[in-house]
Amino acid sequence: MFKREITEIKKTMSPQECNISRIRGCCVNGEKEILSSFGDTFLSLPEEEVFKYYEIFKKTLSGKIGKNVHNLDIPLAAEKEDGEQEFMMRLRKSELKDDELVEEFFQNIIDTYDIVGNYAIILAYGSYDIPGKTSDNATLNDASDEVFRYLLCSICPMSLDKPGLAYNEEAKTVENRKRSWNVEMPTHGFLFPAFNDRSTDIHAALCYTKKSIDKQTVFFRTMFGATMPESAEEQKQMFETVVEKTFGAAPEFAIVKSVNDNLARIAEEKKDQNNGGMNKDELRSIFEESGADETDLETFDRIYDEVVGKGKELLPENVLNASKLEIKTEEAVVSAKLGEGSSIETKVVDGVRCLVLPLNGICSINGIKVS
């Protein structure tokens, strides 16, 4: 799914356009025991509760693609009888009215989801009557020929209120406040099936992780029989390995800075694209522009396939600090906005290699302006 399709589904999370018909859920403690279960037709809930659920569901569809939300391709083996995807298809078909299927689903999560403390599992079923669109992207509400039926799952940590005093309005006294468990915003979740090209794609799912490094690999594999893509941190480590293997363990300052500048340019060019991924050939061109010779490029071709993988892409924003160029030495840390650090260079001054940057405009030390 691309940004526009995710946004389209999120826009239905409102009282005016809501297509969620039923929710089921349970609260689980740190010993993997179900404390309570709940479920109801969605719009029969009090209005305040409905809005709180909207916040949770929208959060499950939020974040950067490739960092917080990942498109997961489901392998064919998972679609066979008794496979992971086949189970999800039966659960979707039941519209969450089959108690045994729902209980099995919850137990699958409890057995594989790795978390410390209490948490809530919230599962929603919805059906979106997909409106048609004209060639200029105008919506045609009366031209629908497909209904997108989906499951949206959110896993939310639960935290206990802090102890304290509170005013009891009925007794008109100040007394010890009754503590309760609060359901927080989700840390993980998924949408199944995926809404690719504004249509149902039962061979894919959209997965959410609040922290990209917390991939919950076992959990998502249990749900869909598929492996989560590399996290942003893992992609950054891959990129650094490719740079060091291509140019040597300590590449020249000018080369690395040039690679960074070229990456910033590519990231800017791709920011409005649906995918935005950078393939092997694009990164090879960046390295070549930055000073890689034929021997370096031969090494790059081999290392990229070994470290990143044949046919795989890296997201520029995952391997690049999108806000600044940061240079660290043993004595100092220098930061500059991307695109504005081109004048920073190294020079030999009195026989010592130095980092040189022009002092243009106002200069300050700890907030104090200096001349």
Image: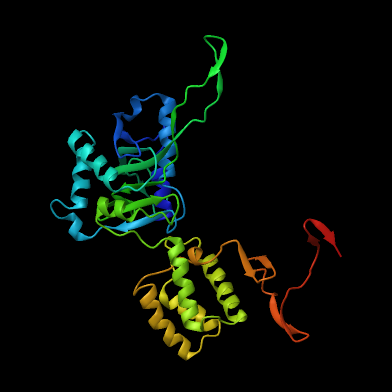
Q: Can residue 141 be seen? A: yes
The image's colour scheme reads: rainbow
Q: Does 358 sit left or right of 145 as displayed? A: right
- Residue 217 appears in which quarter of the rendering? bottom left
Quadrant where the image shows the N terminus:
bottom left
> Considering only vertical position in the picture, is 230 above or below 91?
below
Quadrant where the image shows the C terminus:
bottom right
Q: Nearer the viewer, residue 238 or 133?
A: 238
Q: Residue at x 24, y 36 (%)?
A: 96
> Considering only vertical position in the picture, is 86 above or below 42?
below
Q: Residue furthest bottom?
A: 294
Q: Nearer the viewer, residue 153 or 17?
A: 153
Residue 209, x across and y down, in percent = 41, 51
Q: Residue at x 40, y 30 (%)?
A: 50
Residue 312, x across and y down, in percent = 36, 70
> Considering only vertical position in the picture, is 63 above or below 106?
below
Q: Residue furthest top?
A: 171
> Considering only vertical position in the picture, is 210 above or below 107?
below
Residue 107, x across and y down, in percent = 24, 41
Q: Does 296 sit left or right of 77 as displayed? A: right
Q: Number of numbered discs present? A: 0
Residue 162, x across and y down, in percent = 52, 30
Q: Can residue 149 be seen? A: no
Q: Residue at x 78, y 85 (%)?
A: 350
Q: Does 123 sit left or right of 329 as displayed? A: left
